[in-house]
Amino acid sequence: MTVSFEYAGATVEIVEAGTILAAARVNPVELLRRATFPPPVRRVELTVSSADTPAGPVHVFAAEIGTTAADLPHKERIRAVVLGNDPVGTLLARRIAAGDPIATRIVDGVGTVAVAAYRKLGLDRPGDPAAEPQTAVLADAAAGLQAAVTHESGGGLVRLRAEVPRDEVRPEHLTAMVRLLLQAVAELLPPSAEPLAGRRYVVTRENLPTVATTTREVTLDQVGGLADVVAQLRQIAVSFRHPEAMARWGARRPQGILMYGPPGTGKTMLSRALANEIGADFREIRTPEILDKWLGGSERNIKQIFRDARRYRVPTLLLFDEFDSIISYAGAGGDAASQAINAVAGIFKQEMNDLIEANPAVIVVATTNFPHRVDDSLIRSGRFDVKISVPKPDETGRAEIFRKMIAQLAAAHEEPGFTMFAGDLDLGELGRLSHGMTGADIKEALRRVQLAKAMQDARTGGVVDPIGQRDLTSSIRDLLGQR
């Protein structure tokens, strides 16, 4: 969903604000990096991220505006302020004119130009306690968002920062932050009724590189070789994030999802990626948490799991991994073990019947390598509305998995003076050679090459060539030869 509005003559489009906020729970999301603004504004950056505070987890909206004043020599910055042309001084003066009490207090009893020079551009006399950067506030009353505006020392730099509790953050907060950012930009520009006239800005997510990529951090953007599966999960994420649209049409989003397929195809990883896509906490239920050797213990455990699920106050994805090992062959046999399994299965059915009504913030995912071992009544529509086959990737899919895994490793480990992968890799050939391999197999092939290079590095003291086509081809053939 795209939200459009106009500000200071510019047209602004925010694409999938809910997705941006969800992705920011996992990795920082950078916005407006490629946008251009009129002089003296040189650059504008907006980042949405997540942080833990003593009061609880929050979404952090942080923006930075750089102006030409940052490039001026020390004396030239003083001259610019004295002449009244300094962008930061202009912003401060306009905040005073607008009745900003903090800005007014800053200049009380002191000339506005001197304050702009000494306190805003970092040109203070040594030991002056008033040299600390001062902060004003911009607010959007409709969304209830307040952004602290800091005029940094050194000149030509303005920062905005706002925090919203994670449980309360809404797309409207992102829209409000963009408005406040544009307001600050407009105040830095030469006076005009529409200082951004004729410009168009598209706010869409651009994930910043992370130090490492693990299954805990994975997003649907990072999943390779499963385009159809990813497309289905994106649709489910949209339905989860937009309950107002569901209610308007009387629609019911999926309550449960069953993912099945061969081992190593990424079912658990996809579950984590879905949780990250919708901005949900991830809760994995494994067999030992349910099955108990004592009579009635398993039934109590499954009841407690769903009792807790009904109390979750934040979006939560509940994963029953290896579902068949928890509830398999329901209805089969008459011995005590089968009766216990049947009792757990019966409770599971009852709990799934009205879970979405009891707590719309919970979605259930079950994964299995053996779908034929799960009774049909457990996974019927109404309990598990969506059933997704996760197959082994085809040749094109395997090449895509290689591409994404290699890109993620390079982003995490390459640095100036160190190249991890050769630049002439033939990913199509790697996809062809790895026939029958899953994503987990490809990850293992890469791991073996990484280990071999690291051991060579340790022996030679760093004289090692980047990972090349021959290294990867050999690792693939060795892995396939072990089957």
Image (cartoon, helix red, strand yellow):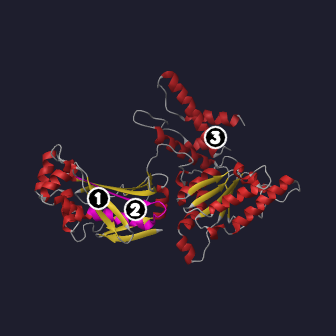
Q: Evaluate whether residue 151 shows in this view.
A: yes
For disc 1, the marked residue is 149
Extreme top residue here?
Answer: 460
Dot placed on the residue nearer the N-terminal end, 1 or 3: 1
For disc 2, the marked residue is 203
Count neighbours of disc 3 (C-alpha within 10 A) and say few if under 14, some if 14 to 19, many if 20 or more: some
Q: Nearer the viewer, residue 396 or 467?
A: 467
Question: Residue 340: x percent and y percent?
Answer: 81, 56
Callout 2 amino acid: Val
Count neighbours of disc 2 (C-alpha within 10 A) and say few if under 14, some if 14 to 19, many if 20 or more: many
Q: Are marks 1 and 3 in contact (CB under 8 Å)?
A: no
How far apart are labels 2 and 1 at the CA level? 21 Å
Secondary structure under tag 2 reads strand
How far apart are labels 1 and 3 at the CA level? 56 Å
Mark 2 or 1: the one toward you: 1
The structure residue drawn at horizontal position 14% and vertical position 59%, both measured from the top left corner, is: 112
Question: Residue 209: x percent and y percent?
Answer: 45, 47
For disc 3, the marked residue is 433
Dot placed on the residue nearer the N-terminal end, 2 or 1: 1
Q: Quadrant of residue 258?
A: bottom right
Extreme bottom residue here?
Answer: 249
